[in-house]
Every structure is written in C-alpha cells, then in structure tokens.
Image: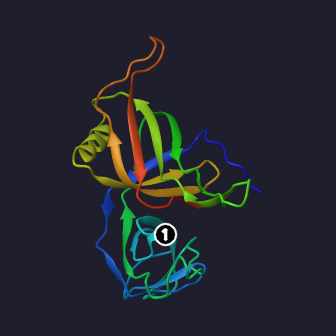
Amino acid sequence: MAYYFPAGTKYFYSNTLASAKTITAVTNASPAVATSVSHGYTDLDPVLFASGWQDANATVFEVDQLTADTFSLLNLNATDTNVYASGSGTGTTQKVSTWVEIPQILTATANGGGIKYGTIDPLASRQATKQPIGFEAVGVDMKIGYDPANAVIQSMQAITRVFGKVALKLVLPGGGRVYGYGNLACSEFPEFGSKDSPIQLSVGVGFDGRAISYGA
C-alpha cells in the first residue's frame, strides 16, 4: 500500500509530438495491444492515442513494447466491448518527448473530475435513485511566480496565444506519474496579493481525454 503527498511534485509539459504511427488493430484486452508496423517504441514511452474508442481518445498512455510491430497501451482495459467496440479502436499514436518543467509553481489544484450522476425517478416510486454515469471534464490549475524574463513562461504564453495543446505530466515524489492532454493557458497579466506574497500568474491545462496514472 502506498500513499503519495503533493510536496515535491513536479509538473512538465510537452508540445513535441513525433510523426503519427498508424494503428491497424487494437485488441479488446487488458492492457489493449496495438498493431503498428515498425512503431519504434521502447518500454514506458508515452504516446498520444487518437482512436475510434471515444473513452480512450486524446489520452496519453505509456507503452510496453512487445514486438517490432506490436505494443501494449498500459492501463487501457478494453475488455468491455460495449464501451470499446471490437474493431473500432484503430487510429494513430504519437510519441511525446522533450518534456519541459513548469517553473516556479506556488500552488496546483485539480479542477473537475468529479462523478456525474443521473437521477432515476419512476412515477410509481416515492424514492428516486442516483446512478453514476461518468465523470466531469478534468484539468489542472496552477499559480506560478511572475517572471517576465523566464524563457519557459514566455514559451507557454506563446502556446496559449495560438490555442495550442500540450501533454502534461505530473511526477510524484514516490515515482508515480499522471498524464493528460489538452489546451494550455498561461496568463500574461500579473496577479497581486498582499505585500508579503509573490506576484503570480495563472496557468491551466484542460484535458481533452482521460487522466491516466501509473505507479512507481
């Protein structure tokens, strides 16, 4: 049993995606196995998966290289064919590289990600019921130190101005990793608090797909 604490967590982003590799087949297995001729991936490479399976689309997975033409998408359990229709998971993968650490983070919080419920209220019943039907969209909000000369902050602001997307990676002190993918927003306007607090900027990433976690 492991517990993780936020102190020491590092946040990285990347907008460097390799050329897309065509996925010609994906198995309904746990983990799902993808077929891509001469994919070139090695174990634990993070890849962005674009798939006909909506529940796995726009999601970053680590891979387990099996053969020159096949690899597993770790933590993708595709055994339920009601969610992952047989033969419909094909698409592409792109390796994510050149991770850049987000500097001077003061606070970081998740937004969204809560459970969504549907209400079932039969006419003949005086007691309605709630049923989980999915999850809210998820993202990460950060406050970072204002530093207009910092090259990484300047790069994040440049990505923001063109509505750019990035992969986000959290590295936890115990070795756990969390990935997401979506639009980056980095404010250019400084935020002022008390005279004893550093001037801050707001940074956020809203995920297009799922957040996927891996242990050490």
User: Which quadrant of the view contains residue 8?
Assistant: top right
Element assignment for label 1? helix
Residue 44 position within the rendered picture, expressed as x and y whole percent measured from the top left: 51, 69
Q: Nearer the viewer, residue 216 or 47?
A: 47
Question: Mark 1: few, some, or many residues within 10 Å (few <14, many ≥20)?
Answer: some
**Would residue 148 be visible to someone looking at this image?**
yes
Q: Nearer the viewer, residue 129 or 15?
A: 129
The residue at the point 52 percent across, 86 percent down is: 27
The residue at the point 40 percent across, 65 percent down is: 58
Q: Is residue 5 above or below residue 117?
A: above
Residue 140 position within the rendered picture, expressed as x and y whole percent measured from the top left: 47, 45
Q: Is residue 22 above or below residue 151?
A: below
Residue 10 position within the rendered picture, expressed as x and y whole percent measured from the top left: 51, 45
Indicate left or right for 151 with 137 as reference: left
Query: Residue farthest to the top?
Result: 195
Residue 38 position within the rendered picture, expressed as x and y whole percent measured from the top left: 37, 86
Query: Residue farthest to the right?
Result: 1
Indicate left or right for 135 with 25 as reference: right
Q: Is residue 148 above or below residue 63?
A: above
The residue at the point 49 percent across, 82 percent down is: 71
The residue at the point 73 percent across, 58 percent down is: 125
Indicate left or right for 133 with 200 as reference: right
The amino acid at mark 1 is Asp
Q: Is residue 38 above or below residue 135?
A: below
Label 1 belongs to which residue?
A: 55
Q: Quadrant of the C terminus?
A: bottom right
Q: Quadrant of the N terminus?
A: bottom right
